Image (cartoon, rainbow, N blue to C red):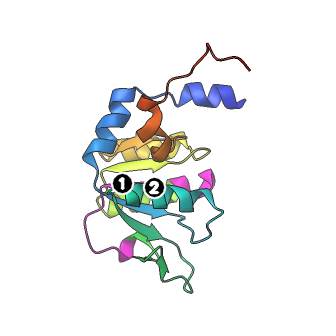
Amino acid sequence: MPEADIDRLYDYNPKYLAEILSSVKTIAMVGASGDKTKFSYGVLRQLNEIGYDILPVNPNPNISEIRGLKVYHSLEEIEKPIDMVDVFRPKEELYSIAEKAISVGAKVLWGQIGVYDDKAAELAENAGLQVVMNRCPKIELFRPFWKPRLDLKI
């Protein structure tokens, strides 16, 4: 499916996204990386700096912290309530992550850009979770402030 079709398929009402991003406080970031060149690192940094409680999740036993934040090796290891599970893993893993998000009592399942699976979304929604796929919370937080300037010359 062409990328433009995927974007239209996962087009969310801005109020829905804003409500989610204003209501969540604790975000478990599955696929968090300590590599500063990775997209997940930049999102983790930005969300943490603006006040979200970020819980990095990475199965690598050699990683114990990212940016001073304790790294959990699975969602099940986290001992506090999780508002949102933000997924930086291949879309083929989203269904099993959705199952885990349900089992730990998360309220939101959020698939990053390129991370979408309708069966995972249906599973999560049927369990009462709000679902967003193929979107980045960092981008969505700043989207209301960005307006294109079509009057500028190239």
In which quadrant of the rendered view does residue 6 lie?
A: top right
Q: Considering depth in this image, is 115 or 55 the residue closer to the camera?
A: 55
Q: Is residue 126 above or below residue 48?
A: above
The three-letter amino acid code for the residue at tag 1 is Ile
Q: Which residue appears at 32% of the width and 41% of the height?
A: 20
Measuring from the top left, give residue 94's x and y in whole percent: 53, 53
| Image mark for residue 46 | 2
In which quadrant of the rendered view does residue 50 lie?
A: bottom left
Q: Is residue 88 visible?
A: no
Q: Which residue appears at 52% of the width and 39% of the height?
A: 118
Q: Quadrant of the N terminus?
A: top right
Q: Is 82 placed left or right of 33 in the picture?
A: left
Dot 1: within a 10 Å radius of its alpha carbon, few (fewer than 14), some, or many (20 or more) residues? Answer: few
Q: Which residue appears at 46% of the width and 42% of the height?
A: 121
What is the magenta range? 76-94
In which quadrant of the rendered view does residue 47 lie?
A: bottom left
